[in-house]
Image (cartoon, rainbow, N blue to C red):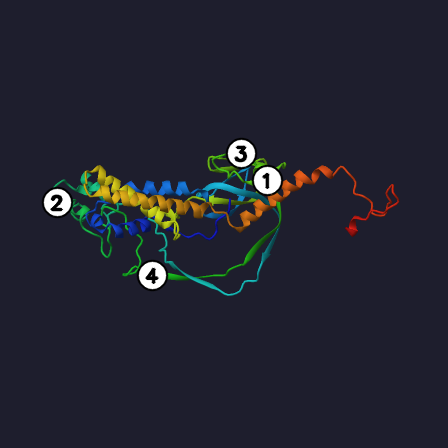
Amino acid sequence: MSYNYTLKYRTFDELLNDVQVDFQNLSLQNMIDPQQLIKIAKKVNYDLGLRINKTKERLLEVEKNRVKLPDDFYTLNFALICDEVSVTQGMPQGTWIEERPLITPYKTTATTIDVCAAPIVNCQSCNTAPCGCSTSATTTCGCNQPTCNRCFTTPLPNSADSYCFKPRIELNCKGEAFELVQVVNPGITRTYRRMLPIRILSNPQSIECDCPNLYWNTAASAWIRDGYLYTTFDCATIYINYQGMLDDEFGNLLVPNHDMLNEYYEYSIKQRILENLLMNDDPTAQVKLQVVEARLRVARNAALSIVNTPNWSEMKQVWEMNRRAQYSKYYDMFKSYSWPNPNRANSGGLSTNINSR
């Protein structure tokens, strides 16, 4: 397969917004439910195959024969062991200034807490009448504290907390107290000069069928199970190239943002919207559904044609494989014979020179 590094993506919400523009009346009537349509976008992603997934790469540090794979890992393209590392640390230069919130120093309290001393820390004890409190809302505590009823309502001075909670960390009156921190960038660079092969045991759910690690015969081997990469060696640095899942860092579903693929997604969602209206006995949905389904077939064929068309590097690889196959078929049979000597005369006294032909 061809690794994808340049395809752009958009979220499912952005795709749904484009569909809602074409169905303005249904959108104003809140008749479009995103929860019923997100599975259609997932189906189209699966229909287009792994070529639309984003190709990612990562360095993993193996410790105690295993390492956790990235959270967005889907299928493995290839993996290599990094060896002969050199670390370059540049001289510190320049500064990096960032702002951080000012954290108030931690304040300790006494070992013995007086529930009647202001501010009251554990006001829930007011219901048990500490220091002479009674259950009456008009009777005050014996230590000259607010009434038991006010223990849960009166706020502390200059604070949003009530008496029933511990005081929070207080900043200035606007909550904008900051400190200035200066961080010097050390500039550390790691360079790996040798990449060693590693054999990956077959796992059809997590490994691409064209992964070269399935066919390498090496002493170092590994396998994927339950989101972890297990190895036969104790520790190492492994470079992996993999196809990531179609979601962003916030868990939102992603779809390709390509002019030749967008219509396939949009018409698929429109087809499901009109189908739901038809199931709800909408008489106008039948004609619209026929028009959308006709255009959906055209959009799907165009999208599959774009996705499955090999690029130049894939065509070159196919040509080289065919070249090697033809060479093995027509030329390897003569390897057991020696080439004729141009300086040796034949039985008729004539000299055979293949270079002159």
Q: Do the residues labelled 2 and 1 touch (CB within 8 Å)?
A: no
Residue 293, image x, y percentages: 30, 43
Disc 3 and disc 4: Cα gap in Å?
A: 57 Å
- Left or right: 83 in relation to 354: left
Number of other residues with Cα within 10 Å of mark 2, as a class: few under 14, some 14 to 19, many 20 or more: some
Residue under numbered circle 2: 139
Q: Under tag 3, what secondary structure? A: loop
Q: Which residue is drawn at 28% across and 61% down?
A: 174
Q: Write the residue at 81% across / 49% down.
A: 353
Q: In this view, does 287 lie to the left or right of 53?
A: left
Q: Earlier in the sequence, mark 2 or mark 3?
A: 2
Give the mark nearer the N terminus: 4 vs 2: 2
For label 4, the SS is loop
Extreme residue toward the bottom, this view:
94
> Which residue carries the number 3 mark?
202
Q: Name the residue under label 4.
A: 177
- Mark 4 belongs to which amino acid? Ala
* Residue 277 drawn above or below residue 28: above
Q: Nearer the viewer, mark 1 or mark 4?
A: 1
For badge 3, the amino acid type reads Ser
Return the x and y of residue 212 as percentages of the image width and height. Answer: 57, 40
- Looking at marks 3 and 4 on the same chain, the residue that comes earlier in the sequence is marked by 4
Distance CA(mark 1)–CA(mark 3): 13 Å
Quote the CA–CA distance across marks 4 and 2: 41 Å
Q: Residues within 10 Å of mark 4 (few under 14, many from 20)?
A: some
Along the line of sight, the residue nearer the viewer: 196 or 5: 5
Which residue is tagged 1?
Answer: 198
